[in-house]
Amino acid sequence: MAGEQVNVNEFQELAREALPKMHYDFYAGGAEDQHTLKENVEAFRRITIQPRILVDVSRIDLSTSVLGHNISAPIMIAPTSLHKLAHPEGEVATARAAAACKTIMTLSFTSSCTMEEVSSSCNAVRFFQLYVYKRRDIATVLVQRAEKNGYKALVLTADRPRLGRKEADIRNKMVAPRLKTLEGLLSIDPAFDNGSNLEGDAKEIMDASLSWKDIEWLRSITNMPILIKGILTREDAIKAAEVGVAGIVVSNHGGRQLDYTPATITVLEEEGKFLFSLMEECGEEQTSSRHWPLVHKLSLLEGLLSMDWQQRGNLG
Ligand SMILES: Cc1cc2nc3c(=O)[nH]c(=O)nc-3n(C[C@H](O)[C@H](O)[C@H](O)COP(=O)(O)O)c2cc1C
């Protein structure tokens, strides 16, 4: 592609040209008919801005804080798997970018680099994202390793009891590389995104029985604040408040899991006020160790991230 890339769509095009088709499709694809994937983009386009003029904007401060960590703007790095498919430095480079931008990176459970490599690479504030396998001892080991290595929160991704059916990955026979993080913990290769030949293994590995009662178990193995990622309904937001987690991440997993769910930003538009009042109620009732007010901020952040990733063609 000629010339310098000046916007994210052009970076997406560059990636399409540079990456093997199998890997590009892995990053960019959504589940089933990709309705939710498209809707994530379209719903953002439908939102217009009502600008106010003649306001002094010579000094703008977009900084905020999440779980007590200051960030320069309400934009964080969402957990995304296998960065080394796109760049030899993988998540270490992403963490450095997070540090440079003064934001928080959530390291994916399915990262190419180990959590130790990432934590020793720079001083970015990091959260750790967890998938729960049937072998619960693996979660225990990883969560405790994350805590020991200075990760500041645990993000439980709860919208993947099984893999979303990504047709491009099936066609391409996408094979996920071995995860260094799991070395010595798991003898077989799990499938992480519906690789046709690996899906069977993944079904064996993921714990589809994970439920609300397991939040108590998670709390028993860590002192990190826990966030639940993948909430799309007010009913589940209420349950999350009831079990007393530190916050929620409103998300449809970038349209990679259950297709025909609403766009994340649409949920935020429709439920934002409700979530905000829930947050205020819980903030009053709960102790300071349970920072429920995060719900609002993270929701907003996730909405922004959705735009970011989708418009960048899901690179990550
Ligand atoms: C290539 C790619 C890999 C992803 N890997 C993960 C992952 O490992 N864990 C996870 O919780 N979410 C993963 N996600 C989902 C993102 O964290 C995020 O939820 C999504 O990109 C934005 O959509 P949302 O606004 O609906 O959350 C991945 C997304 C993409 C595009």
Image: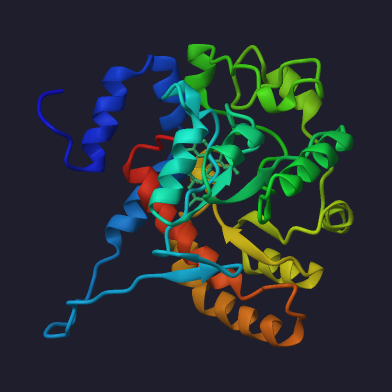
The colouring scheme, among rainbow, by chain, secondary structure or one colour, is: rainbow
- How many labels were placed on the picture? 0
Residue name at image x 26 percent, y 34 percent: 11
Q: Nearer the viewer, residue 253 or 121?
A: 121
Give the camera-side residue of 310 and 110: 110
Q: Give the vertical position of 112 relative to 61 (above or below).
A: above
> Which residue sits at x=29%, y=33%?
12
Q: Give the camera-side residue of 159 and 24.
A: 24
Task: Where is residue 66? Give x, y as percent.
Answer: 55, 67
On the image, the x and y values in percent for residue 24 come to 39, 23
Q: Position of residue 10 (x, y in %)?
A: 21, 35
Left or right, residue 116 beside residue 306? right
> In the picture shown, does residue 226 fall above or below 180?
below
Q: Evaluate whether residue 30 shows in this view.
A: no
- Quarter occupied by residue 229: bottom right
Residue 220 shown left or right of residue 12 in the figure: right
Which residue: 11% across, 85% down?
54
Quadrant that contains the C terminus: top left
- The quadrant the N terminus occupies is top left
Q: Position of residue 245 (x, y in %)?
A: 74, 65
In which quarter of the view is residue 292 placed? bottom right
Q: Is residue 298 visible?
A: yes
Up the image or down, 54 lies above or below 164; here it is: below
Picture residue at 79% right of the left edge, 27% below the top: 205
